Image (cartoon, rainbow, N blue to C red):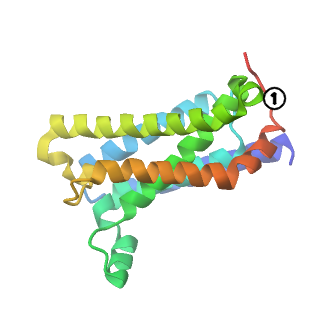
């Protein structure tokens, strides 16, 4: 695939996200929740655009980033605890809670794994010198980012009080934080097993800068 077509695909992914972003901003269930959920996504997207020429990720990684951002946008619109599709699944299968948040954390873990792995491969010698450490470090970066996110949620809850309940989406589960991090780890393992070779093939087409 030519560079022009690849860039066109990347632009198309951005346009798709922006369309969903605009939709999600129209009459969200809870405006505060929408702002808290979408704020980090907007910052992340800006960083990806600003750094695109200097450090473009593989198309595989961008696709999953886009999917994850869309999941967050949908979650921000409906709130994670009231996602209608997972509400329907819950009624069909007798679930006690809406599992959209767990699904979202799983995808976030997969995306974090792809990002961490790609940065480590392209910006460090770890794969060539200590390939087993690549897996260890990538998974640790995923869990570190998941832990930081949970701490940010905790901070927001302390600052805003009961107003953050929709954002936290614990749905009465005292183990929600642990489940969120477990799902992130599961997503990372899935990404590692399912997409490592695919990602490696795409990285071969990119300039590797280990400076």
> Is residue 141 left or right of 92 when viewed as pictured?
right
Q: Residue at x 26, y 72 (%)?
A: 96
Residue closest to the far bottom: 92
The residue drawn where x is 77% and y is 28% is 128
CA neighbours of label 1 inside 10 A, class few (<14), some (14 to 19), many (20+): few
Could you say where residue 46 lies in the image, as x and y percent from the top left? 52, 33
Percent of width and height locating residue 79:
31, 58
Q: Quadrant of residue 208?
A: top right
- Direction from residue 25 to residue 119 in the image, left or right: right
Displayed quadrant of residue 3 = top right
* Residue 21 location (% of width, % of height): 46, 52
Q: Residue furthest top?
A: 211
* 43 versus 177 height, above or below: above
Secondary structure of residue under mark 1 = loop
Q: Where does the image place residue 155, in percent across and percent down from the top left?
A: 23, 34
Q: Is residue 50 above or below residue 205?
A: above
Residue denoted by label 1? 207
Residue 148 appearing in the image: yes
Query: How many numbered circles are shown?
Result: 1
Residue 91: quadrant of the picture: bottom left
Q: Residue at x 65, y 29 (%)?
A: 120
Q: Residue furthest right?
A: 2
Quarter in which the C terminus is drawn:
top right
Question: From where the camera sits, is residue 15 visible?
Answer: no
Q: Between 34 and 207, which is closer to the camera in this rendering?
A: 207
């Amino acid at each position: 695939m030519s560079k022009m077509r690849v860039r066109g695909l990347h632009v198309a992914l951005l346009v798709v996200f922006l369309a969903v972003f605009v939709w999600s901003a129209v009459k969200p269930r809870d405006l505060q929740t929408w702002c808290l959920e979408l704020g980090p996504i907007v910052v992340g997207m800006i960083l990806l655009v600003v750094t695109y020429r200097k450090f473009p990720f593989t198309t595989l990684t961008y696709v999953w980033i886009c999917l994850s951002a869309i999941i967050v946008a949908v979650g921000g619109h409906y709130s994670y605890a009231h996602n209608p599709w997972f509400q329907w699944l819950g009624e069909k299968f007798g679930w006690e809670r809406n599992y959209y948040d767990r699904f979202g954390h799983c995808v976030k873990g997969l995306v974090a794994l792809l990002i961490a792995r790609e940065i480590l491969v392209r910006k460090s010698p770890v794969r060539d010198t200590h390939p087993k450490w690549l897996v260890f470090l990538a998974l640790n970066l995923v869990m570190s980012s998941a832990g930081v996110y949970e701490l940010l949620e905790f901070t927001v809850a302390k600052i805003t009080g009961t107003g953050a309940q929709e954002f936290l989406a614990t749905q009465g589960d005292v183990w929600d934080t642990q489940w969120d991090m477990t799902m992130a780890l599961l997503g990372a393992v899935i990404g590692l097993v399912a997409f490592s070779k695919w990602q490696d093939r795409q990285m071969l087409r990119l300039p590797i800068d280990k400076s």
